[in-house]
Amino acid sequence: MSETNQTRWVGIPEIVGRQGKPGLLPISRSRFYELLQEGRLPKPQKLGRRSLWREQDLIAAVEKLLGEG
């Protein structure tokens, strides 16, 4: 299977960054949760106690948000 067909799951630290490391999205953790609550970002999947998002779903949602602006 090629890497482009593999699903990559990401958590909050990978999405908004942590300890000076940038994340996928250039927004704060609180803004990320606001967008989730507004339904503008996809809901997470739960794996045990972790909330994870498919990277491609987040990218598609961000592209849609950029198109709205």
Image: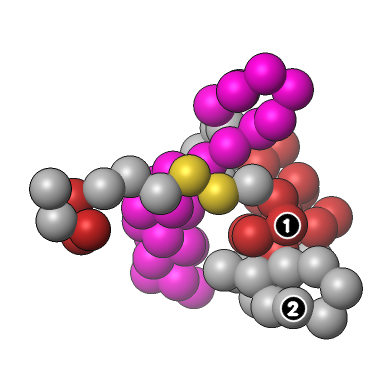
Foreground residue, 68 or 53? 53
Which residue is denoted by mark 1 in the rendering? 13
**Residue 35: percent from left, percent from top:** 67, 49
Q: Which residue is drawn at 73% across and 68% down?
A: 17
User: Label 2 to label 1, Cα distance in Å?
Assistant: 9 Å
Q: Residue at x 58, y 37 (%)?
A: 52
Q: Residue at x 76, y 46 (%)?
A: 33
Q: Is residue 36 left or right of residue 7?
A: right
The answer to whether residue 68 shows anywhere in this view is no
Residue numbers of the magenta segment: 45-69
Q: Is 48 above or below relative to 42?
A: above
**Residue 22: percent from left, percent from top:** 69, 78
Q: Which residue is drawn at 73% across and 57% down?
A: 13
Which residue is denoted by mark 2 in the rendering? 21
Q: Is residue 1 left or right of residue 59?
A: left
Q: Is residue 6 magenta?
A: no
The tag on residue 35 is none
